[in-house]
Image (cartoon, grey):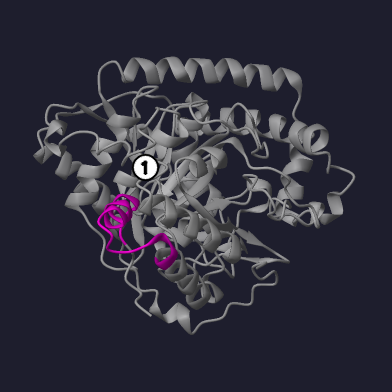
C-alpha cells in the first residue's frame, strides 16, 4: 500500500482525460486506503463501497463517450455526517437519533454529484456539530493522522482527517464557530468557510442558523476553488474540465494585508507565533503591504457569538430536531450541558447580541475597506489529547481547549465573511499549524489566492500515517459499511 497522499481533484481529472487511469481504479484505491488506515483514525461513519464503485463505472463510461459531467468528474469525496446523504445513517453523531436514515441528499451533495463527484462515505462529526474535538464519551471519535493521541479538531474532524490521510482529496464540512477551519488547521489541510448563504444549507442539520456555513476541505487550495465553484453555483462548464485555477499567484503583489493583534487572545505559544510570523514574512516578501487594523475585543466578539449560538441551538434542538429535552439522557455530557446552559439565555440577551453582531460587521467592513485580506491565527496552540479532549496545557497552565481556539475563529461566523484556513508549517511537537485569511463578503477568490501563495511557499512534509495501518483504536462505534 502506497501511503503518499494522492493528487488533487484537478490532477485526477487530467489523468482521466489523458486515459492514464479510470475512476474505477481511483475509487478502488480510495476504498483500500480507508480499509488500511481508518481503523487507526476513525474518520468515517459510513462507507458506500458498492454504490461508489457502481458510480465510478458510470463515470468511466461517460469519459469513454466523451461526456464528463463536470469539474469533479470521478473524484471521490466524503461528506460530514451533519449533511444529508441518501441512505446514510441520519444520527448526526448522536444516540438521540439512533436508527434514523436519510431519505434524500442535501442540496450541496446534489451539486457535488451533478459535477461528477462520487460520494464514498460520510465522516464523523462532534455530536450535532456542537464541539471542536470530534470525540464522544460513549462512541469514541476521530484521531489526528499526525498523532493518533491527539484530537483532529472539530466539528468537521472526520472530514479533515480523511483528507489529511489521503483517503479522499476533497470533503464537505460545516462551520458554525470554526468547525471547518479548526480541523483543517490541526490536520494540516485547507478549509474554506464561504460567505454566509453562498452555499445552500438545505438538508444540513441546523446548529445556529444565522451562524451556520457549509464549505469544502481539501489538501490543495486549487481543490477548494474548484469545489466552491460547484457548490456556490458559479456555473462551471459541466461538459469540460470546469473552472481553471483563478489567477497567477504573482497577482498577490500589492494586495494589502491586515493584522489584528487585539484578536490574539489568548496569546500564541512560541512555535505558533513563529509560524504566523513566517506566513506574514512570505506575504510581505511577495509585495503585500502590511498594516494593523482595529476589530474590537476578541472576548467581546466571542461572548456575542456565544449568546447567539446558544439561543439558536436551543431552538434547533427543542423545536426543529425535537430531541431536547425529551431525549436529553441520550446526549453526550458536553452537548447536554451546553443545552442546559442555553435554556437560561433570554430574549433580551439575544437581541442585544444581534445588535452587537451588526456593530461587529460594520467594524470588519470598515477594516476591509482599508485592506484586502486579514491574516489571523486559527488557534493559540496545538490540539488536545483524546484522553483529555476538553483541556490543554498552554503557556504553563491548564486552559479549556475551546478557549484556546474559538476567540480566533468565531468572528468570521459572527460577520459572515469568507475565511480560508491553510497550513503554514509544524509546531515544536511536529503538529500542523494553520493561519486563516478573511476578506470582504463575496471575495472568496482573494482568500484562496493568498492561501495558495502561502501553501506553495510553506509546504508541509508528508503526513506520518503509515503507522495507522497497524493501529486499531478503541472506537465504540465502528464505521457502518
Across and down, in percent, residue 102 comes to: 72, 48
> In the image, 109: left or right of 335?
left
Q: What segment is highlighted magenta in the picture?
A: 7-25
Q: Is residue 12 magenta?
A: yes
Across and down, in percent, residue 242 comes to: 33, 38
> In the image, 149: left or right of 419?
right
Q: Residue at x 72, y 17 (%)?
A: 348
User: SS of the residue at dot 1?
Assistant: loop
| In the rendered image, the vertical position of residue 387 relative to residue 253, given as above or below | below
Residue labelled with disc 1: 71
Q: Magenta-highlighted stretch: main secondary structure? A: helix
Furthest-bottom residue in this view: 470
Comparing 56 with 386, the one in front is 56
Q: Residue at x 35, y 52 (%)?
A: 9
Q: Indicate the quadrant where residue 374 lies.
A: top left
Q: Is residue 16 magenta?
A: yes
Comparing 236 with 56, the one in front is 56
Furthest-right residue in this view: 326
Amino acid at each position: 500500500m502506497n501511503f503518499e497522499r494522492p493528487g488533487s481533484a484537478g490532477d485526477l481529472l487530467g489523468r482521466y482525460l489523458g486515459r492514464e487511469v479510470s475512476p474505477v481504479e481511483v475509487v478502488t484505491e480510495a476504498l483500500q486506503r480507508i480499509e488500511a488506515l481508518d481503523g487507526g483514525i476513525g474518520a468515517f461513519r459510513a462507507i458506500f463501497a458498492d454504490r461508489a464503485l457502481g458510480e465510478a463505472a458510470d463515470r468511466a463510461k461517460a469519459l469513454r463517450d466523451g461526456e464528463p459531467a463536470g469539474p469533479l468528474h470521478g473524484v471521490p469525496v466524503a461528506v460530514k455526517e451533519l449533511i444529508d446523504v441518501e441512505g446514510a445513517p441520519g444520527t448526526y453523531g448522536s444516540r438521540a437519533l439512533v436508527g434514523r436514515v436519510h431519505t434524500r441528499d442535501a442540496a450541496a451533495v446534489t451539486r457535488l454529484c451533478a459535477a461528477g463527484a462520487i460520494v464514498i462515505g460520510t465522516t464523523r462529526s462532534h455530536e450535532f456539530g456542537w464541539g471542536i474535538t470530534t470525540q464522544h464519551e460513549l462512541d469514541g471519535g476521530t484521531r489526528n493522522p499526525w498523532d493518533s493521541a491527539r484530537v483532529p479538531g472539530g466539528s468537521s474532524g472526520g472530514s479533515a482527517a480523511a483528507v489529511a490521510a489521503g483517503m479522499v482529496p476533497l470533503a464537505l464540512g460545516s462551520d458554525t464557530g470554526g468547525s471547518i477551519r479548526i480541523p483543517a488547521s490541526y490536520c494540516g489541510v485547507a478549509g474554506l468557510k464561504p460567505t454566509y448563504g453562498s452555499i445552500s444549507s438545505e438538508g444540513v442539520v441546523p446548529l445556529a442558523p444565522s451562524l451556520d456555513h457549509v464549505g469544502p476541505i481539501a489538501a490543495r487550495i486549487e481543490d477548494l476553488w474548484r469545489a466552491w465553484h460547484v457548490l456556490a453555483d458559479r456555473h462551471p462548464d459541466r461538459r469540460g474540465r470546469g473552472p481553471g485555477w483563478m489567477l497567477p499567484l504573482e497577482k498577490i503583489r500589492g494586495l494589502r494585508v491586515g493584522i489584528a493583534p487585539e484578536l490574539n487572545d489568548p496569546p500564541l505559544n512560541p512555535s505558533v507565533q513563529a509560524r504566523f510570523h513566517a506566513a506574514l514574512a512570505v506575504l510581505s516578501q511577495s509585495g503585500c503591504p502590511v498594516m494593523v487594523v482595529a476589530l474590537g475585543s476578541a472576548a467581546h466578539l466571542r461572548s456575542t457569538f456565544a449568546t447567539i449560538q446558544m439561543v439558536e441551538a436551543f431552538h434547533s434542538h427543542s423545536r426543529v430536531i425535537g430531541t431536547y429535552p425529551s431525549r436529553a439522557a441520550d446526549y453526550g455530557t458536553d452537548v447536554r450541558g451546553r443545552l442546559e446552559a442555553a435554556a437560561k439565555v433570554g430574549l433580551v440577551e439575544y437581541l442585544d447580541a444581534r445588535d452587537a453582531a451588526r456593530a461587529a460587521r460594520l467594524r470588519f467592513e470598515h477594516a476591509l475597506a482599508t485592506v484586502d485580506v486579514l491574516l489571523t491565527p486559527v488557534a493559540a496552540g496545538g490540539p488536545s489529547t483524546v484522553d483529555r479532549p476538553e483541556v490543554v496545557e498552554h503557556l504553563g497552565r491548564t486552559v479549556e481547549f475551546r478557549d484556546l481556539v474559538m476567540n480566533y475563529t468565531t468572528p468570521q461566523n459572527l460577520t459572515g465573511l469568507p475565511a480560508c484556513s491553510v497550513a503554514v508549517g509544524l509546531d515544536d511537537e511536529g503538529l500542523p499549524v494553520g493561519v486563516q485569511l478573511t476578506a470582504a463578503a463575496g471575495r472568496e477568490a482573494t482568500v484562496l489566492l493568498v492561501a495558495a501563495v502561502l501553501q506553495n511557499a510553506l509546504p508541509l512534509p508528508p503526513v506520518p500515517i503509515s503507522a495507522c495501518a497497524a493501529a486499531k483504536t478503541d472506537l465504540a462505534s465502528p464505521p457502518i459499511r
